[in-house]
């Protein structure tokens, strides 16, 4: 899948701080997941059953960082997992959005996760381009 020429749609920013555009379920599938905040079509089971997303709906927030309990245990656990497995920080993403806005964040993500070789989307989960399978180091 190629990175779009236009800005990444802000609906692709999940409540937890994940940019769904760079998720492996979005990058590699003929019927890609359309992000946390869209329908459950194409989503892996763990995303369909996400307690963080459900919590935000119940509390009436769009993003976890808006909550007075932030960062809660669920976010801290997800953060630890993303730090260890993918060397990525969802909490840093959220803090950037809080301070600079979602549009600026998504523009930065577009630059970071576009393959310099072919313009494909680099998956955050395996650091591989969805088009040419080039392994990318950040």
Image (spheres, rainbow, N blue to C red):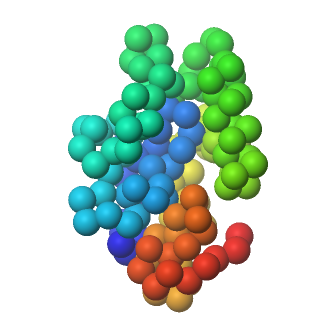
- Residue at the limit of the structure toward the front, as seen here: 45
Q: In the rendered image, which quarter contains the N terminus?
A: bottom left
Percent across and percent down for residue 59 are 45, 11
Q: Nearer the viewer, residue 70 or 100?
A: 70
Percent across and percent down for residue 13 are 46, 43
Residue at x 52% of width, y 64% of height: 123
Q: In the rendered image, which quarter contains the C terminus?
A: bottom right
Percent across and percent down for residue 67 are 58, 16
Residue at x 38% of width, y 66% of height: 28
In the image, residue 110 sits, relative to residue 136, either above or below, namely: above
Is residue 113 among what the camera can see? no
Q: On the rendered structure, is 71 left or right of 124? A: right
In the image, residue 89 sits, relative to residue 46, either above or below, namely: below
In the image, residue 77 sits, relative to residue 17, either above or below, namely: above
What is the quadrant of residue 73 in the picture?
top right
Residue at x 28% of width, y 49% of height: 42
Is residue 135 among what the camera can see? yes
Count of marks overlaid on the render: 0
Q: Nearer the viewer, residue 32 or 116?
A: 32
- Residue at the limit of the structure toward the bottom, as seen here: 117
What is the quadrant of residue 92 in the picture?
top right
Q: On the rendered structure, is 11 left or right of 138? A: left
In the image, residue 30 sits, relative to residue 33, either above or below, namely: below
């Amino acid at each position: 899948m190629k990175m779009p020429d236009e800005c990444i749609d802000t609906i692709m920013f999940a409540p937890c701080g994940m940019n769904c555009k760079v998720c492996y379920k979005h990058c590699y599938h003929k019927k890609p997941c359309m992000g946390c905040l869209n329908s459950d079509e194409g989503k892996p089971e763990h995303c369909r059953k996400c307690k963080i997303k459900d919590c935000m709906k119940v509390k009436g927030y769009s993003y976890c960082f808006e909550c007075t309990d932030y960062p809660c245990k669920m976010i801290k656990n997800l953060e630890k997992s993303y730090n260890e497995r993918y060397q990525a920080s969802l909490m840093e993403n959220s803090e950037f959005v809080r301070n600079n806005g979602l549009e600026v964040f998504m523009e930065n993500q577009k630059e970071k996760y576009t393959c310099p070789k072919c313009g494909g989307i680099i998956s955050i989960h395996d650091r591989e381009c969805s088009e040419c399978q080039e392994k990318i180091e950040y």
